[in-house]
Amino acid sequence: MMLSCEKKNEIAGKYVTANDMTQKNIVAYLELMPNGQGTWSIEEDSASFYWEVRKEKIWLHTKSGGVIPGTIDGDTLTIDLPGMGVHRFIKR
């Protein structure tokens, strides 16, 4: 449990989408708080979720009950959103 808390604190923070042509210049932001709460923001819209780290992956739990997995690679999170494609977030 201690290792999980340390990893969560290490990953918590603010992220922004990597400057990538495949993302059509839409900037998205992720804010991961150490208490497991998070916010995904795109332009004027945002969504809240709960997040956790399991087996070197990040799991975003939506309010509607969905779970979106992502990979952790240092200060980069890669999340594949159904219907929206792959988003790479870099910690600011």
Image (cartoon, rainbow, N blue to C red):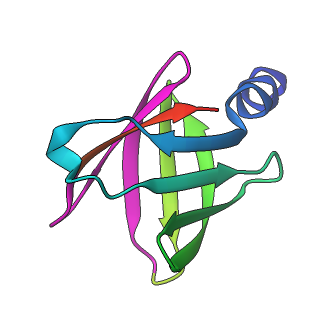
Q: Quadrant of the C terminus?
A: top right
Residue drawn at the location 53% of the way across and 54% of the way down: 29
In the image, 24 versus 34, the foreground residue is 24
**In the picture provided, is 74 more to the left or to the right than 37?**
left
Is 52 inside the magenta-drawn segment?
no
Residue sticking out furthest to the top = 74
**In the picture provided, is 67 more to the left or to the right than 11?**
left
In the image, 80 versus 21, the foreground residue is 21
Residue 73 percent coordinates (x, y) = 45, 18
Compared with 65, 32 (above or below) is above
Q: Quadrant of the N terminus?
A: top right
In the image, 20 versus 7, the foreground residue is 20
Compared with 37, 58 (above or below) is above
Compared with 27, 17 (above or below) is above
Residue drawn at the location 58% of the way across and 41% of the way down: 15
Residue drawn at the location 59% of the way across and 37% of the way down: 53
Residue drawn at the location 84% of the way across and 24% of the way down: 2
Residue 85 percent coordinates (x, y) = 18, 53
Q: Magenta region, mostly helix, strand or loop?
A: strand
Is 69 inside the magenta-drawn segment?
yes
Residue 74 percent coordinates (x, y) = 53, 15
Q: Could you tell me how many numbered marks the image carries? A: 0
In the image, 79 versus 91, the foreground residue is 91
Please give the range of residues in magenta.
Answer: 65-85
**In the picture provided, is 71 more to the left or to the right than 44?**
left
Residue sticking out furthest to the front = 25
